[in-house]
Image (spheres, rainbow, N blue to C red):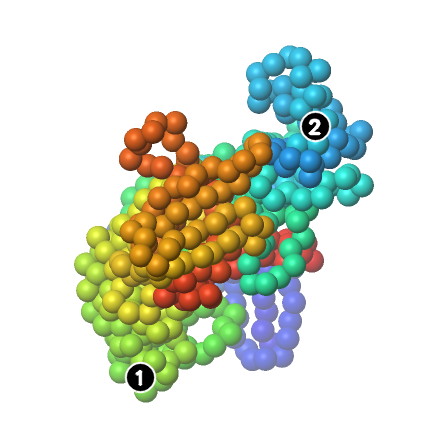
């Protein structure tokens, strides 16, 4: 009969699957005996330890004895005002929200005038909107994330295109208007309404890409199911031995504060899993047995307990055992073994991952490149530059992201106006214009010398921007309808290179006649469909690829189930 003593309740349940005994409640006295033995007091306590030996059995992960709490993804929402809509906004505002909006406007404009705030609120140039999104897991203070803005039901708002969200505050989901609700983030910026791929967009709903910012530092703690001074000390010491002194600080007999190491600062969700998976062995033999067990499971998919995480949590002692699996005939096993080894500092594993990425028939190419992306700078440069010219766009994007993470010299970055960046990466074939539409808006050009054709004539879908040139012209002319009054802005002269055209479109208009940077101030959201038209019409010899907008609604729906 198998007897289990539960961690938090102390109740017992039985089943008839053997005669082994597993006891999981560790008394302070029992843990003291273990530590005394380790510290050289084995002789004095030998008899007591012998009596308790069978009753004490560690050989469990930290997650068995404690819960690891971290700053999980948080649903946030609030109300704000989108400005600059012409006559597409609405003077209507629900009664229950109006007072919140008035206070918001007064605070942001630093005024006590209610009339001034109401005048702005009631203008058809503006619209009150609901703003919502998800703060990512483990986000440090200042982390940027996307938010959705949508016009309120029952108002006359017809479109949010071209609008800008006035800075507003976001609180936990369903806490809007509740006294004392904690402000977790702010949001502001240009509203992006989907306008490519031939779709018919809902113009009363859009995304502010990277427009929200978290304002609280994340907190991670380990909380034991039962307070126990000795077990708390053991867990703290195990964490510090594995991840470095100061990572874990015991605050009470049962609560440990965690400071994630720098290498996991942007991967706190993974670090949380590593802490929970950290193994507390009874002795050296049981730890080796655990390593072998986890390594043998590398080929298993859909695991309840991730063997990769388990091995990485144990640390460098696993390296010798895991290396054997690089010889496996199973590519999936080689991928996972190499990923573990690279995370543990065995740089030679990067070449196994590179071989997988070079195999054009492999379904694991992108995973292999993403794994290399967290290696040392030299490893990334040596292994990933070759993939920038790959035919598979997903492979190219994965390689680009890894190189971008280390600010590789093959990538040049330029701020265009105040809204987005343009990045150019050296590529020798497969010219591509890639639009990044999550967290940090950018236009990424794969290829250094992509040029528009002579005799180009392109107009935007809304006919507000025209790009043209006669067959023998040295420059391209670009004009834009004035968004504020009748008439046009331009023409601005540009070179034929796509980077020159993007610069001329997006740079802010200069008041200086001979300014080095002259632009039309076209929004990122307006430039994207222009580039799509240029690529698909053949005006530019490049493939157009756009990252999907963040599917925030689906993620929220899944979390609220």
Q: Is residue 486 visible?
A: yes
The residue tagged 2 is: 123
Q: Is residue 53 visible?
A: no
Q: Is residue 17 left or right of residue 428?
A: right
Q: Earlier in the sequence, mark 1 or mark 2?
A: 2
Q: Taking 237 as reference, is 293 above or below it?
A: below
The residue tagged 1 is: 328
Percent across and percent down for residue 99 are 73, 24
Q: Residue at x 58, y 73 (%)?
A: 2
Q: Quadrant of the N terminus?
A: bottom right
Q: Is residue 64 left or right of residue 384?
A: right
Looking at the rendered image, the disc whose residue lies closer to the viewer, 1 or 2, is: 2
**Secondary structure of the residue carrying numbered label 2:** loop
Q: Nearer the viewer, residue 23 or 235?
A: 235
Q: Is residue 285 left or right of residue 96?
A: left
Q: Taking 131 as reference, is 294 above or below it?
A: below
Q: Which mark is residue 240?
A: none
Percent across and percent down for residue 270 are 43, 56
Q: Residue at x 38, y 31 (%)?
A: 510
Q: Nearer the viewer, residue 458 or 177?
A: 458
Percent across and percent down for residue 276 are 46, 56
| Tally of numbered tags | 2
Q: Residue at x 71, y 44 (%)?
A: 158
Percent across and percent down for residue 539 are 41, 62
Q: Nearer the viewer, residue 342 or 70?
A: 342
Q: Badges 1 and 2: C-beta atoms under 8 Å apart?
A: no
For mark 2, does the 10 Å Cα neighbourhood hold few (<14), some (14 to 19), or many (20 or more) residues?
Answer: some
């Amino acid at each position: 009969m198998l007897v289990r003593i539960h961690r938090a309740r102390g109740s017992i349940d039985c089943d008839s699957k053997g005669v082994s005994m597993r006891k999981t409640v560790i008394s302070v006295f029992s843990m003291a005996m273990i530590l005394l033995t380790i510290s050289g007091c084995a002789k004095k306590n030998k008899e007591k330890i012998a009596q308790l030996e069978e009753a004490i059995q560690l050989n469990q992960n930290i997650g068995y004895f404690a819960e690891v709490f971290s700053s999980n993804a948080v649903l946030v929402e609030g109300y704000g005002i989108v400005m600059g809509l012409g006559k597409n906004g609405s003077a209507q505002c629900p009664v229950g929200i109006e007072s919140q909006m008035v206070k918001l406007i007064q605070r942001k404009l630093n005024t006590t005038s209610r009339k001034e705030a109401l005048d702005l609120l009631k203008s058809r140039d503006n619209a009150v909107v609901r703003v919502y999104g998800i703060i990512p897991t483990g986000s440090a203070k200042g982390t940027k994330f996307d938010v959705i803005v949508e016009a309120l039901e029952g108002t006359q708002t017809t479109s949010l295109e071209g609008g800008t969200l006035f800075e507003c505050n976001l609180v936990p989901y369903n806490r809007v208007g509740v006294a004392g609700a904690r402000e977790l983030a702010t949001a502001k910026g240009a509203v992006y309404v989907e306008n490519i791929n031939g779709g018919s967009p809902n113009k009363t709903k859009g995304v502010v890409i990277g427009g929200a910012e978290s304002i609280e530092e994340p907190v991670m703690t380990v909380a034991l199911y039962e307070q126990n001074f000795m077990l708390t000390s053991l867990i703290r010491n195990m964490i510090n031995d594995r991840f470095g002194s100061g990572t874990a600080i015991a605050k009470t007999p049962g609560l440990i504060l965690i400071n994630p190491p720098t290498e996991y600062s942007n991967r706190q969700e993974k670090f949380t899993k590593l802490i929970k998976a950290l193994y507390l062995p009874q002795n050296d033999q049981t730890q080796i047995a655990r390593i072998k067990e986890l390594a043998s499971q590398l080929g298993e998919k859909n695991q309840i307990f991730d063997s990769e995480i388990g091995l990485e949590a144990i640390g460098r002692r696993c390296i010798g055992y895991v290396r054997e699996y690089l010889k496996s005939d199973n590519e999936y096993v080689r991928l996972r073994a190499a990923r573990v080894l690279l995370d543990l500092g065995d740089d030679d594993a990067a070449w196994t991952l590179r071989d997988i990425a070079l195999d054009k028939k492999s379904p694991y190419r992108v995973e292999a490149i993403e794994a290399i992306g967290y290696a040392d700078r030299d490893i990334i440069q040596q292994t990933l530059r070759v993939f920038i010219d790959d035919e598979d766009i997903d492979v190219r994007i994965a390689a680009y992201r890894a190189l971008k993470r280390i600010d590789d010299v093959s990538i040049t970055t330029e701020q265009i106006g105040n809204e987005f960046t343009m990045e150019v990466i050296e590529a020798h074939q497969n010219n591509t214009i890639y639009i990044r539409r999550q967290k940090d808006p950018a236009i990424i050009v794969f290829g250094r010398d992509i040029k528009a054709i002579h005799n180009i004539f392109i107009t935007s879908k809304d006919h507000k921007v025209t790009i043209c040139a006669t067959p023998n012209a040295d420059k391209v002319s670009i004009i834009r309808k004035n968004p504020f009054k009748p008439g046009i802005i331009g023409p601005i002269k540009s070179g034929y290179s796509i980077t020159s055209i993007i610069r001329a479109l997006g740079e802010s208009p200069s008041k200086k006649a001979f300014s080095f940077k002259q632009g039309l101030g076209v929004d990122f959201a307006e430039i994207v469909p222009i580039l799509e038209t240029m690529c698909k019409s053949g005006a530019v010899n490049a493939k157009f690829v756009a990252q999907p907008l963040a599917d925030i609604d689906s993620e929220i729906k899944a979390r609220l189930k």
